Amino acid sequence: MYKKGLKMLMVMGSALSLTLSACSTGGSTPIDKTPAPTTTPPAQTSKPAENVKITFWDENPGPNRTPFYEELIKRFQAKNPNIQVEYVGIPASGAKQKYDVSIAANDMPDVAGINMVWLSDFVAKGAVQELDPYFKDWSDKDKIASNIVEFDRGLTADKKLYYLPHTMFLDILWYRTDWVKDAGLKAPTTWEDFFTDVDKLTDIKNNRYGFSIRGGSGSINQLTSMIYAYSGIGEYFTPDGKATVRDPKITEFLNKYVALYKKNTPVSDITNSNKEMNATFDTGTTAIIQHNFGSYNDHVTNLGNGKFAGVIPPKAGNGKRVVVPVANGLVMFKNSKHPQEAWKFLSFLMNADSQTYWNQNIGQMPTNTDSLKSDYVKNTQHIQQGAEVLADKETIALSLPSHLPDYTKITTQQLEPDFQRVLTGKMSVDEFVKGWATSMEKAKADYDAAMKK
């Protein structure tokens, strides 16, 4: 499956590369005027002119996102005065649990942003609306890269469309260019450079650390990107169902990586989520962090241009570059009393103007082909680099097994606390890897058996 994902991403990367030198449209396509779909899944509908209220949940609110959603909602309501959109920010730390509770109580929002890895669970619970009947009649459907749409279909076993991403991103190593230059070091474009820089840039007496490890919420997603990038392994499972995390190259990396804790990183890393980790970089405590495109604007605000840059995690020793793309996006929930209006809002967020505005402000990559021709994309260095990486024939896109119903549970309830035990020396790397592999292999076997019934 990773080859199919790579093909999709290489096409996407090639398209991006072409747009970087093309004349920009500035994201100036007309505001979406899509009519309601002619075929609507069974649901209670409302008359188009009726004044209605729909609810939109944001799964990761904050000052670097909420104001931009609020602005998009204002723009949408100006064009659709009969539709009121209520914005609700769900704190990221408990977002999945909040969604699960709302599904159990049948009290879900109309439209929501969700993490890609939650989708298969929500589909299995019968909570989200199939979007094919709406999407096929949408006038702008051909402006969403077809390979992205096919990638979305591959997120669930039935290959139907439930999810549309209005942004995508890659993991990246942000580093202090001024610190690296002053120390006479190289940018961390190889794994040797990475570990050398982390060590040489550590000056604990002056409260400077070479790196910050994300040890709190969300740690396994970032760790997965790093271990597979280092190993050069492009498959999560072998053909016989064994988890590739058992590979010695991954253990080799983990031993090196875990050894950085407290020696080259802040002690607080053990509980740091992305917010705290990014803060160590922005306040001049840490030289290098691993995050994603989305924190770019915060770094510009806090550090200014010229003091930092980013590189995609390096190629492995085998010459392969393994990346784990993430495409975060939007779903409609089945209990919506106003599905036509819900779709109208969702499709508005997917149009070129909305995507350009959203991605420019959060520093990520759009999926609308008109938005990919905007000045924002053409002039943003880390987006250009992402395009080059995705277009490289040596790049492998690792497909995470997020379709496994137990995937999120394993990563958050087992692996996150286990990783903290590894960092504190209460669990060995070997025990951690064995537990990771065993749980994922069982989840895959259970899923495969269920699909055969």
Image (cartoon, rainbow, N blue to C red):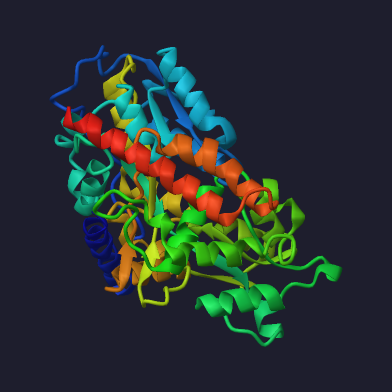
Quarter holding residue 106: top left
Note whether 343 is above or below 404 in the view shown: above
Residue 413 position, x and y percent, is 54, 35
Residue at horizontal 61 percent and vertical 56 percent from the top: 298
Camera-side residue of 191 and 152: 191
For the question of whether residue 23 can be seen, the reply is no
Residue 92 lies left or right of residue 398; in this view the side is right
For the question of whether residue 103 can be seen, the reply is yes
The quadrant in which the C terminus is found is top left
Residue at horizontal 21 percent and vertical 32 percent from the top: 451
Residue 343 lies left or right of residue 70; in this view the side is left
Camera-side residue of 67 and 25: 67
For this orientation, the residue located farthest to the right is: 205
Note whether 359 is above or below 442 in the view shown: below
Residue 402 lies left or right of residue 213; in this view the side is left
Camera-side residue of 395 and 332: 395
Residue at horizontal 41 percent and vertical 19 percent from the top: 103
For this orientation, the residue located farthest to the bottom is: 184
Count up the numbered dots: 0
Quarter holding residue 320: bottom left
Residue 154 position, x and y percent, is 24, 44
Quarter holding residue 448: top left
Residue at horizontal 32 percent and vertical 40 percent from the top: 444
Residue 89 position, x and y percent, is 54, 31
Residue 338 position, x and y percent, is 31, 17
